Amino acid sequence: MRHLLSTKDLSRDAAIEILDIAEDMADVQQREVKKLPTLRGKTVVNLFFEDSTRTRISFEAAAKRLSADVINFSAKGSSVSKGESLKDTAQTLAAIGADGVVIRHGASGAPAVLAASGWIDAGIINAGDGTHEHPTQALLDAFTIRRRLHPGASRGRDLDGVTVTIVGDILHSRVARSNVWLLSALGASVHLVAPPTLVPVHTTAWPATIGYDLDAAIDAAPDVVMMLRIQAERMNAAFFPNSREYSRTWGLDDDRFRRLAPSSIVMHPGPMNRGLEISSAAADSAQSTVLEQVANGVSVRMAALYVLLSGEREVAR
Ligand code: CP
C-alpha cells in the first residue's frame, strides 16, 4: 500500500491486516521503551490546513514511536497565508526530503490530488479532507469496537453481526463516511440517524440504512451508538439547528443514555459539544470509549505509518 486516502478502497482483509498490526503497536506501547526503530531516518510531515487536536498529536506520537523525524506544518503562520499553493507547498516538502505526508485539508479530495500529482514522492495519509473521508479515524473506531467486544482476543476478527448506529450531522461528517465504508466492509450493519436536513442526498448508494427516530434506534439496543459533532463551522447560519431543539430530538441526553442497553458502547470521535449532541453523563460513563478512541488512535496511526513507509507486513516482536 502506497497511500491511505479512503476506507472505500480498503478490502476486509486489508483492514484486518492494519488492525492486527495496530494490536502489535498497542503491545509495543505497554513496554517500558515504547519505541520501534523501524522508521529511523525517515521524515514524516504533518501538513494541517485545518485545526486538529487528536489527529495531529497522535500522528506525531505515532511517528516518533516508530523513530521517524517529525515536522509539524500548520497553514496558520505559514506561507499558505500569503497565497502559496498546494503544489508549491508539496514541492517544498519534497525538497526537504519528506517520506510521508499526513494531510488534513478543507477541500474534499486534496489528499488524492497530492498522491496523484507527482509534486512529491511520498506516502500520503488522509487525516481528514473536507466532508469526504477520515480513514484513520474509522480504523481506530473499528479497532476500539473490536477490542471492546472481544477483550484480549480481537486479532484476526472482523465485525460480522455487529450493529452500529451513527447519529447526527451526517451531511458534514467525514468520520461517518469513512465508518460507513469500513464498518460495512468488516461485516457490521450500519444504521444512520439524523435530521432530514443533515443527510446527504447520495446516501441511497451507501451500505447503510437511514432513519429519523433516535428513540427507536436506542430501543433497538445496537452494539454501538456513535454520536457525531454538529459541525457549525461548515454550516450556513440559516441551517444551524436550534441547540435546545437539536439536543431534545437528536442528542444522546441523560434520559436516552439511561434507556440504552448496558452492553451498548457509546462512541464520539471528538471534539464533543457536551450538552448538544451528547450529555456529560453519557460521555464520561463506563460505556463511553471516547478516551480509548484517542489512545487507540496512536496504535492505529503507528500501524498506518508502518505499512506505508516500512513496506513491511508484519511487526518484528
Ligand atoms: N476526531 C478528530 O479528527 O479530532 P481532531 O479534529 O481533534 O483531530
Image (cartoon, grey):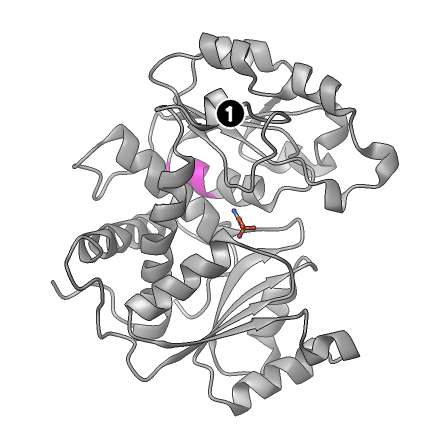
Amino acid at circle 1: Ser
Q: Position of residue 309 (x, y in %)?
A: 35, 73
Q: Determine whether 102 is above or below 82 in the image.
A: above
Which residues make up the magenta segment?
A: 182-186
Quadrant containing the C terminus in the rendered view: bottom left
Quadrant containing the N terminus in the rendered view: bottom left
Q: Position of residue 314 (x, y in %)?
A: 20, 63
Quadrant in the rendering for residue 209: top right
The secondary structure that dominates the magenta segment is helix
Q: Is residue 262 left or right of residue 192?
A: left
Q: Is residue 66 left or right of residue 8?
A: left
Direction left: furthest residue: 317
Q: Is 185 in the magenta? A: yes
Q: Secondary structure at mark 1?
A: helix
Mark 1 CB lies closer than 8 A to ligand 1: no
Q: Is 249 in the magenta? A: no
In the depicted view, which residue is nearer to us: 11 or 146?
A: 146
Quadrant in the rendering for residue 252: top right
Residue lying at 73% horizontally and 40% vertically, measured from the top left = 232
Query: What residue is disc 1 on?
Result: 280
Direction bottom: furthest residue: 95
Residue lying at 75% horizontally and 74% vertically, measured from the top left = 81
Residue lying at 70% horizontally and 80% vertically, measured from the top left = 79
Q: Determine whether 17 is above or below 270 in the image.
A: below
Q: Position of residue 284 (x, y in %)?
A: 43, 27
Q: Position of residue 71 (x, y in %)?
A: 48, 76
In the depicted view, which residue is nearer to us: 251 or 18?
A: 251
Q: How many numbered callouts?
A: 1
